[in-house]
Every structure is written in structure tokens, then in C-alpha cells.
């Protein structure tokens, strides 16, 4: 019997942030100026791999079927392949989100540790557009090299592109062509108002409908069936077979199907990407609490959950700061 929240949604997925640090400074996520003096978590505050594995087993016991490792940038966490090795043997679908910059040195070890799925983020093929968006002038070629390496190692890859009006909509078609040719599904993500530092404005959202308009003619898309709880709506190009996904979190929120919990790198449990506070699971784990006590806390958090921020966004009036995506895990 699945664990249901206050709105009847089952607990099925968990995103685990393994670090709040990142080797990029994307303007829409960790803007360089806002994070220049940011106090990142001290290494000793991060959940250890033993603690994460223990929690993962408890979550799986409560119905979680999917775990995604994220951050920050998960590949900057030392020995991340060791964590993958521990989790890959559990009865769960395991994936990892990355900007691919460090894949070159780590793809082989990750694959060998049992990881099969990668969600890779890239917002532009053009070097100057990407360089500006990532805040550090890092060339897209470095990401593309990581993607090539991952493909050669046999990873199942999904590509994520955040589209921001006036910033990178020029890259929609080049990205679509590039990844269609490599048979890698490309997902277009609407720019979201996560955190407090990306100066989000509704006018900067380049919607999924806007993207489809750009693709029309060159890529004629038909809707594909997908699981109800998927964040993306899937489409296939009738001519080439290329696959595209649309994560329309602003223009078509999917809160009613949200089956996800998020665990920050220091063990705080969040019931929504837009939450203002987390539940301190890390303290219980570190204090040596028995499994039943930890499971009871997760159960209580989930059964009391009534978040549906994206559906309420238009009427949201709160002034309390939200947590940053780099901390809570994207
Ligand atoms: N570093 C990893 C990566 O690049 O995939 C994992 C963490 S990152 C926060 C996860 C995803 O969140 C990335 O695809 C990123 O583009 C996306 N993201 C971050 N801020 C966003 C925002 N304001 N709106 C939409 N997507 C965002």
C-alpha cells in the first residue's frame, strides 16, 4: 500500500543532494555575484555515504522506486562512484544529474559502479551564449566532450535545457538538431522562480509552447504516452523519430502528480522544490536513531504534505526566503 500525502499523492521518488557546491555559476541558479561570499556547507556537515545508504534503504522500504543523485554538482563530491556502488545494488532506479564537466575523468568509474542513467544539463551549443549563462565562460565543448564519453560508455542519457527568454532561445533549434542527430532525448525546462537570487521574472519564461513554435516545420511532434508522475510531457518527431520532453513547470504545473521528496546534502528533508524549510532527518541519523524512528518521521512528513507551490504561484504572496536549488538539489 503506497504512502499517500494529504492530497493523495504516493511517495515514489527521492532526490538526494550530495553537495551544495558547483563548478559552474549559472546565472539562473547560482549567480556568481550572489554566491561570491556564500557559506557552503562544511564537509563534516554532509551526510556520509553510510548515512545516505542507510536512509536510502529506509526510503525504499516506504515505497521509493526512483533515486536521483544531484546537487550542486554531484561529481565534485569526492569518491561519488563509491556512493553509486552502494546504491546501485538496491531495488531502485538510480540516476544522476550532472553538468558533465567532470564526466571525462569519472564516466568509467561511475559506469563500473553500476550507474546507467545520466541527466545532463546544457543550455546552449554556442560557446558565447553558454559561456555567459554558466557564469564562468566555460566552453560548451567541454560539456559535449563529457556527453560523448558518457555515450561511448553506454549510459542512457537525457539532456536538460533551461530556456530563458532573451538569453538562449536562439539555441533551441541548434540544440534540437545536435541531440536529435545523436539520438539523445532533449528536454526543455521552463525558467523557474527557485531560490531568491536569480531575479526571476515571469516575462523571462520561454514557455514549452514557445519552444514548440520554434521547432514547428523542422520537427513535427506528436505526443507520446508517459507515466502520470513524470515531470515532462513527451513528444516524438514524426519524421526523424527524435524524442523531446517539455517540463512546463510554470505554464502547466504538475503538482497534483508530484511524488517526490528531496534530501539536502546535510540531511534536511524537503517536500517541495519551493519549500522554505526542511525537516532535520540528518540529526536523527547522526544521533543513531533506530530505523523505525527515522521511518516514522518520514511517514509523518509525507502524510502531512500538502505543498503545491507551482499551482499556487500566481497567487503566492509569501515574503519569506525560499531555499536555493543548489542546496536543496535540482
Ligand atoms: N549540477 C547538476 C546539473 O547541472 O544537472 C545538478 C543540479 S542542477 C541545480 C539541476 C537542474 O536544475 C539543471 O538542469 C539546471 O539547469 C536546473 N535549474 C537550476 N535552476 C533552475 C531554474 N531557475 N529554473 C529551471 N531549472 C533550473
Image (tube, rainbow, N blue to C red):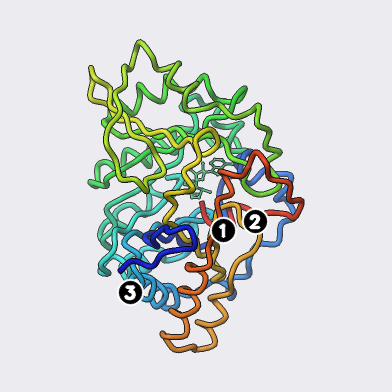
For this orientation, the residue located farthest to the top is: 217
Label 2 residue near ligand 1, CB within 8 Å: no
The residue carrying mark 3 is: 61
Query: CB under 8 Å between callouts 2 and 1?
Result: yes
Closer to the camera in the image, 324 or 101: 324
- Position in image of residue 252 (x %, y %): 49, 35
Whichever of labels 2 and 1 marks the residue nearer the N terminus, that label is 2
The residue carrying mark 2 is: 323
- Position in image of residue 8 (x %, y %): 43, 59
Number of other residues with Cα within 10 Å of mark 3, as a class: few under 14, some 14 to 19, many 20 or more? few
Q: Quadrant of residue 43?
A: bottom right
- Position in image of residue 285 (x %, y %): 50, 82
In the image, residue 13 above or below residue 26: below
Whichever of labels 3 and 1 marks the residue nearer the N terminus, that label is 3
Closer to the camera in the image, 196 or 20: 196
**Quadrant location, the N terminus:** bottom left
SS state under label 3: helix
SS state under label 2: loop
Number of other residues with Cα within 10 Å of mark 1, as a class: few under 14, some 14 to 19, many 20 or more? many
* Residue 328's disc number: 1
Q: Which mark is nearer the camera, 3 or 2? A: 3
Amino acid at each position: 500500500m503506497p504512502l499517500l500525502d494529504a492530497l493523495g499523492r504516493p511517495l515514489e521518488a527521492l532526490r538526494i543532494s550530495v553537495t551544495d557546491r558547483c563548478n559552474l555559476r549559472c546565472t539562473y541558479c547560482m549567480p556568481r555575484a550572489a554566491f561570491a561570499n556564500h557559506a557552503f556547507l562544511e564537509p563534516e556537515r554532509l551526510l556520509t555515504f553510510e548515512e545516505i545508504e542507510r536512509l536510502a534503504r529506509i526510503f525504499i522500504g516506504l515505497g521509493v522506486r526512483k533515486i536521483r543523485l544531484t546537487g550542486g554538482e554531484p561529481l565534485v563530491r569526492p569518491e561519488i562512484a563509491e556512493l553509486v556502488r552502494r546504491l546501485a545494488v538496491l531495488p531502485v532506479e538510480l540516476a544522476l544529474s550532472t553538468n558533465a564537466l567532470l564526466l571525462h575523468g569519472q564516466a568509467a568509474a561511475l559506469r563500473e559502479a553500476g550507474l546507467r542513467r545520466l541527466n545532463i544539463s546544457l543550455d546552449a551549443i554556442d560557446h558565447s551564449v553558454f559561456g555567459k549563462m554558466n557564469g564562468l565562460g566555460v566552453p560548451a565543448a567541454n560539456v559535449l566532450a563529457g556527453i560523448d564519453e558518457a555515450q561511448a560508455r553506454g549510459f542512457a542519457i537525457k539532456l536538460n535545457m533551461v530556456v530563458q527568454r532573451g538569453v538562449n532561445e536562439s539555441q533551441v533549434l541548434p540544440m534540437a538538431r545536435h541531440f536529435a542527430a545523436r539520438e539523445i532525448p532533449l528536454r526543455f525546462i521552463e525558467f523557474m522562480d527557485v531560490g531568491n537570487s536569480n531575479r526571476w521574472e515571469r516575462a523571462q519564461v520561454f514557455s514549452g509552447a514557445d519552444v514548440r513554435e520554434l521547432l514547428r516545420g523542422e520537427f513535427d511532434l506528436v505526443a507520446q504516452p508517459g507515466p502520470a508522475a513524470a515531470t515532462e510531457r513527451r513528444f516524438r518527431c514524426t519524421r526523424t523519430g527524435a524524442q523531446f520532453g517539455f517540463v512546463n513547470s510554470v505554464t502547466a504545473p504538475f503538482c497534483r502528480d508530484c511524488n517526490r521528496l528531496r534530501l539536502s546534502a546535510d540531511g534536511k528533508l524537503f517536500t517541495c522544490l519551493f519549500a522554505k524549510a526542511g525537516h532535520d532527518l540528518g540529526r536523527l541519523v547522526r544521533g543513531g536513531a533506530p530505523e523505525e524512528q527515522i521511518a516514522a518521521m518520514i511517514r509523518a512528513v509525507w502524510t502531512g504534505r500538502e505543498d503545491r507551490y507551482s499551482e499556487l504561484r500566481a497567487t503566492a504572496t509569501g515574503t519569506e526566503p525560499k531555499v536555493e536549488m543548489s542546496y536543496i538539489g535540482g
